[in-house]
Image (cartoon, rainbow, N blue to C red):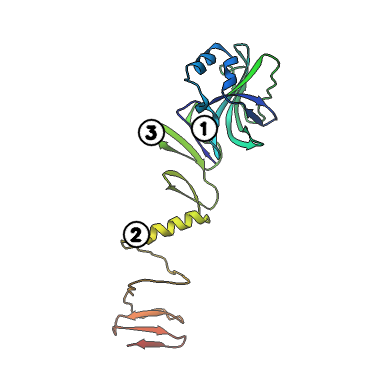
Amino acid sequence: MKLKTSLHQAIELATCCSELDIELNGVEGLSNVNPTLNHALKNKTLSSDNTFKNIFGPDVLFFYTVEQFKKDTVVQYERGIGYLFESNDKIFIRRHLTISVGEDAATSYYISGTPASFKCSLGQHLIVASSCPRSSLEYFIAPNSILTSIAPFRPHSFVVDNDCLVGRLDGEVGPLKINDKGFIETLIGAISKYTKQISLSVSKLQAARLSTALLQLIPTKDPIAKRGHLVYDEENNYLKYYNGSSWIAIK
């Protein structure tokens, strides 16, 4: 999955339901957390447009923070990389990689391992919000990661798996699987529309079927003889083919 960042803030009330998963509960309940969020909801600077589903959607990784509030004070904090998934008409964040934990953002420290355990008692709230990396190093979340951009000042990264090329398809730079049917069809379509000369330096080109309006054979002299070879004889100015034992002229 690609790692996506957004200029828009995603923020929701949440419930920690397992060791890795956090259930997202929307923005409406944020009015009960503190006066600042209540004011933002009333003035519509915070709305359902700010849900993770609307801003990120499925099949992408993103940076997140989790803050556990007791009244107006943060008592537990986590920052990491996650992704969305749906189950039984509910939306969850799967915590894919934990970056740092602590009592709050100021006292958090880097870790690599088990995410924090959040347990909210009566009067406490859990808030999940989108975040940004603190340095460019945090974009390189796995071996063979590549950092690029999807717009000015909008970096994103992706991981190049085995048997992949890197290219720009459908407007974004990303990995292109060599054996993917969509990629192959796109590549064939692009080549078929290309009207200029393509020069290949390969020693052998094998095709089950070849259809062309014009086939030009490069004149040659004393070629290596193999059964089925067709050449243009430069010295005698005619076509000839090799039947396995001798050259047969085509006049």
* 250 in relation to 68, above or below: below
- Disc marking residue 54: 1
- Local SS, label 1: helix
Q: As shown in the figure, which amino acid type bears the numbered disc 2? A: Tyr
| Residue behind mark 2 | 194
Tell me the residue at 62%/37% (across/down).
Answer: 86
- C-alpha distance separating marks 2 and 3: 31 Å
* 247 in relation to 215, above or below: below
Quick one: quadrant of the N terminus?
top right
| Residue behind mark 3 | 152
Q: Give percent across and percent down for residue 14.
A: 62, 24
Q: Nearer the viewer, mark 1 or mark 2?
A: 1
Q: Nearer the viewer, mark 1 or mark 3?
A: 1
Does the image show residue 11?
Answer: yes
Q: Is there CB contact under 8 Å for labels 1 and 3? A: no
Q: Give residue 216's quadrant in the image.
A: bottom left
Q: Give residue 187's quadrant in the image.
A: bottom left
Q: As shown in the figure, which amino acid type bears the numbered disc 3? A: Pro
Q: Give percent across and percent down for residue 168.
A: 42, 47
* 101 in relation to 39, above or below: below
Between 143 and 89, the one lying in front of the other is 89
Q: Pointer 2: residues within 10 angstroms few (<14), some, or many (20+)?
A: few
Instruction: Describe residue 228's horizontal placement relative to residue 221 as left or right.
Output: right
- C-alpha distance separating marks 1 and 2: 39 Å
- C-alpha distance separating marks 1 and 3: 21 Å
Report the number of discs. Answer: 3
Tell me the residue at 53%/36% (across/down).
Answer: 57
- Local SS, label 3: loop
Q: Earlier in the sequence, mark 2 or mark 3?
A: 3
Q: Pointer 3: residues within 10 angstroms few (<14), some, or many (20+)?
A: few
Q: As shown in the figure, which amino acid type bears the numbered disc 1? A: Asn
